[in-house]
Amino acid sequence: MQNLVDCRRMVERGLATHKPKAKKVAKEEKSALRISADMLVADIQALCPGSEPILAAWGLHCFGCSGSALETLGEGARGHGFSDSDVAELVDDLNAALEAEPPRPKELTITESAAQQLFAIAVAEGREKEALRVTLDGQGGFCLEFEAKDASADPTFGNATVPELLVRASALTLVRLGGSSIDWRDERFKLDLAEKEGCKCTSDTKTCGCQK
């Protein structure tokens, strides 16, 4: 990944996890966003918090190796002797876990302090005419990278106090962090995930008991 903003990574808290599911899961078209065998393993990890136990239950442990950022799910599975039907069933399991994630609003909040700090970085690097994209990684964290403002039609977000700053997120990214806030405090960027429906925990709770 290139053009990282000072390599500052925002840590996501309160992610739900899923128990491994049986191999055969009924397919439901709840969302147009689907995991496919052509996706990188690392991208699936970033998109779906419950993917690791499912992959492990299928005997695939590639989520823990460096190859997860280079190899697609289909390539990894077939490399372990999976048939096409096995791959299809695995994809069904992963999509069932993705569909079980509570829906999130398709928006992000950029606090005034975060907007000011991000734009200051953009100016310092001569990138003030570019947008910043929020990207997921396979370790449960998020980064920001510069890109041209007209590089994509994905929605952009910002703060009225710094109208020059545009932060962009794809529909897939918003599945994970929609409704959340990017803030600058304690001399670092922080991502505050929106609480899930029925959650009684605070944003500072490291392990959300409501999600167990």
Image: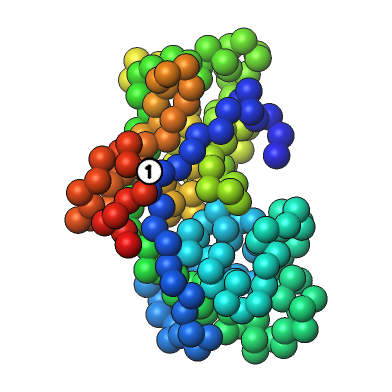
Would residue 115 be visible to someone looking at this image? no
| Residue at the spot 48% in from the left edge and 22% down from the top edge | 188
Would residue 87 be visible to someone looking at this image? yes
Label 1's element?
Answer: loop
| Residue at the spot 58% in from the left edge and 17% down from the top edge | 122
Q: Is residue 71 left or right of residue 188?
A: right
- Where is mark 1, residue-wise? 206
- Where does residue 8 sit, x and y in percent of width and height? 58, 28
Q: Is residue 179 above or below residue 122?
A: below
Which amino acid type is marked by label 1? Lys
Q: Quadrant of the N terminus?
A: top right
Q: Is residue 181 above or below residue 55?
A: above
Q: Pick whichever, 63 or 166, lies toward us.
A: 63
- Where does residue 110 sit, x and y in percent of width and height? 38, 28
Q: For label 1, count other residues whose C-alpha is less than 10 Å away and answer few (under 14), some (14-19) or many (20+).
A: few
Q: Quadrant of the C terminus?
A: bottom left
- Where does residue 3 sit, x and y in percent of width and height? 68, 29
| Residue at the spot 56% in from the left edge and 65% down from the top edge | 52
Q: Pick whichever, 137 or 165, lies toward us.
A: 137
| Residue at the spot 63% in from the left edge and 23% down from the top edge | 6
Q: Is residue 102 left or right of residue 175?
A: left
Q: Pick whichever, 34 or 45, lies toward us.
A: 45
| Quadrant in which residue 57 is drawn | bottom right
